[in-house]
Amino acid sequence: MSFLTASLRYGSRPFLLANQQSFLYRNPINRIQARTSMESPEPGDTPILSEDFFKKQMRLKRPLSPFISIYKPQITWTMSIGYRITEVFILGSISTYGIYLFAMDYTNFGYLFTALSDLQIPSSVLTAVKLIAGIPFGYFVWGGLRHIAWDRGIGFSLPTLYKSAYLTITLSLLTGLALAFCKF
């Protein structure tokens, strides 16, 4: 029986790993896994956190668990979070609009534009709304192209990473402004 066949047959059964005669037990990693999964911890193994520990943490003004506020903001992780937020915003908006169109059964898109123009919304409000929607859209598009470049293995050096980050932000703002002042 080959090792792969035996691993597939017996590897998912932890009680077989603990068997001293099993050839899987002879592998040090499997032996450690078998011991840790089969043995219960000793009473003295787990440290007991006393109230003094928590008082010390509060005195030192430390959070009980790491939170985003303790890290220095860097453009790399802030852009990553921003890309995910814009992704949810864009895809959520498109999905909501699609469900709305499906529910209302509008087949004539001209009717929607006519209904929007009949609301008599001031142009400054429309420009602001288009700007608010245009910047995340531009960020989503340019950030997506940045990710495609990474998928191709381009732009992993730190100076290139920062240049592409600032370029993405600049192009996002320009795209948002172009969409905001576009008449449609």
Image (cartoon, rainbow, N blue to C red):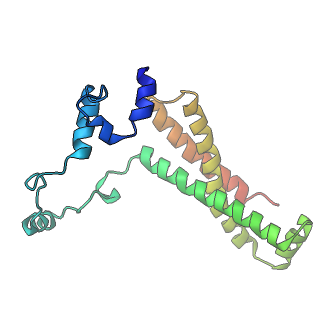
- Asked whether the viewer can see residue 158, the reply is no
Q: Relative to 129, is 1 on the left or the right?
A: left
- Asked whether the viewer can see residue 118, the reply is yes
Of 129 and 147, which appears nearest the observer? 147
Check the picture and name the quadrant holding the N terminus. top left
Q: Toward which corner of the image does residue 183 lie, by quadrant?
A: bottom right
Q: Is residue 134 above or below residue 55?
A: above
Q: Toward which corner of the image does residue 8 lie, by quadrant?
A: top left
Of 170 and 80, which appears nearest the observer? 80
Q: Residue at x 58, y 38 (%)?
A: 146
Of 3 and 114, which appears nearest the observer? 3
Residue 69, horizontal then vertical, whole percent: 32, 59
Q: Relative to 33, is 87 on the left or the right?
A: right
Residue 73, horizontal then vertical, whole percent: 37, 51
Q: Residue at x 53, y 37 (%)?
A: 164
Residue 179, horizontal then vertical, whole percent: 72, 56
Q: Toward which corner of the image does residue 76 lie, by quadrant?
A: top left
Of 56 and 166, which appears nearest the observer? 56
Q: Residue at x 39, y 35 (%)?
A: 11
Give the tally of numbered discs: 0
